Image (spheres, rainbow, N blue to C red):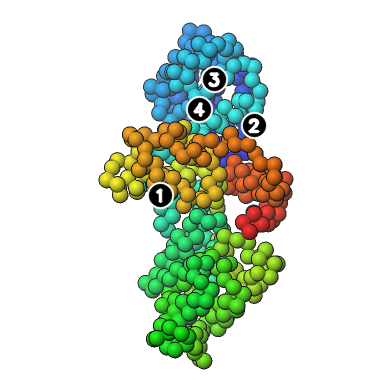
Amino acid sequence: MTSSAEKTCILVVDDVPNTLEVLQRNLTAAGFTVLTAPGVPEAIKLTESTPIDLVITDLKMPKVSGIDLVRYVRENLRDTEVIMITGYPSIEGAVKAVKMGAEEYLPKPFTDEELLAAVRRSLDKLRTRRVRRAATSAAPPRTYGLIGQSPPMREVFKAIGKAAAASATVLITGESGTGKELVARAIHYSSPRAAAAFVPVNCGGIPEGLLESELFGHLKGAFTGADESRAGFFQTADGGTIFLDEISETSLSMQVKLLRVLQDGEVYMVGANRGRRVDVRVLASTNKSLPDLVQKDLFREDLYFRLNVVTIELPALRERGDDILLLSQYFAGKYAKESGRPAPQFSDEALHVLKNGYHWPGNVRELENVIHRLVIMTEGQRVEVPDLPAPLRFPAFREPSLTRPLAEVEAEYIRNVLASVGGNKTKAAEVLQIDRKTLREKLNKAKA
């Protein structure tokens, strides 16, 4: 039973008592709050006194039909979805129900699985509409400059708050494009060092031969071309914070020098015989599993332990549920403003594809690029599914490769399970029938 199900109220309307009893029992077992009504007049009275998320109604009932109830819901209840069920299925009935506003049309008899699948689809559409309306009517909620309300991101926000209040070294992990530098900035600017410098360093973007000089500085004449002494990033960050992005890309020899700085608080400029003390807080990030690199002798174990005092693990975008919708609305507004044009609106179907139809290997950075392109290229003010890039529209129709390693297939399945439970690792471990420790190890291995 999930917390979202507990808060969801479903109204079941049918003139057959046995049907009401069966549906109520099955939906209650799935964790929903369920009300019942034997007819349309009784159902309308309930909707006037109780907020209803979903109405499941029979089509043919005495006096007032289910179609009339669908019409009433559509005209009076903006935040309610409808599922039509009937023992007399016909194409004409299905078309009429859908035209009136029913999201789903279920012919009897249907299985418990078919019912619950229809309920989940309808509630997902309702949640999408609510998120879109909230994001459109006001700026999406931002915490530490980061956008997100999903359970995994709430855990990240808690960790940022605790890390900002301390002075320990922080290791930020997560796939590329998840926002590791944003988290580092959030820690710095929420800490007592906020008035001092925040210095980001892309360890993988600086050639190995220059990295030591860039980090620690050099004296005049220390090497060919050193015409004057120059301070390095650590001296620039004195009193503040240095962010070592993708620290896993550093060589073993550079790792020794970084370990010395963390242990002694001193940096040695290239060409110098004496160290210089610096007061710098070190934040580091990686998109790889450092424990795996340690086992392969590609990363020093002692440096890993020095860095891993506090760890903040950023979730992949596919694990963040409705955050995808919030981010899409935010980026659409941002780039529309830059272009001097109104922000486009997304259809429910387009939002469904953005949230559920794609794996997002590039995470938030990839989503931002997609939305930027849509703002520029979409004709009109509404984004429909055909406007989306082909990789988003057709992932389900690609032939699965039978040459992929088992570990890769397993990792993808684990990520899909995580996405299906909104990033809840405890729930995912239950579905996979493994413990949380094993799940964490498999996720870390997948990132290596």
Mark 4 or mark 2, earlier in chain: 2
Q: CA distance from mark 4 to mark 3?
A: 13 Å
Where does the image place residue 227, in percent across and percent down from the top left? 39, 86
Answer whether residue 169 is visible to the viewer in this image.
Answer: yes
- Give the residue at mark 4: 54
The amino acid at mark 2 is Ala
Q: CA distance from mark 3 to mark 2?
A: 22 Å
Location of residue 183 with respect to 427 vertically, above or below: below
Q: CA distance from mark 1 to mark 3?
A: 36 Å
Check contact, mark 2 vs mark 1: CB within 8 A: no
Most extreme residue toward the left is: 340
Q: Nearer the viewer, residue 53 or 432?
A: 432
Where does the image place residue 123, in percent across and percent down from the top left? 52, 32
Tell me what residue is drawn at x 52 percent, y 76 percent: 209
Q: Would you call the spot at circle 2 few (<14 residues within 10 Å), some (14-19), or many (20 or more)?
A: few
- Give the residue at mark 1: 141
The amino acid at mark 3 is Tyr
Q: Nearer the viewer, residue 364 or 39?
A: 364
Q: Nearer the viewer, residue 285 or 202?
A: 202
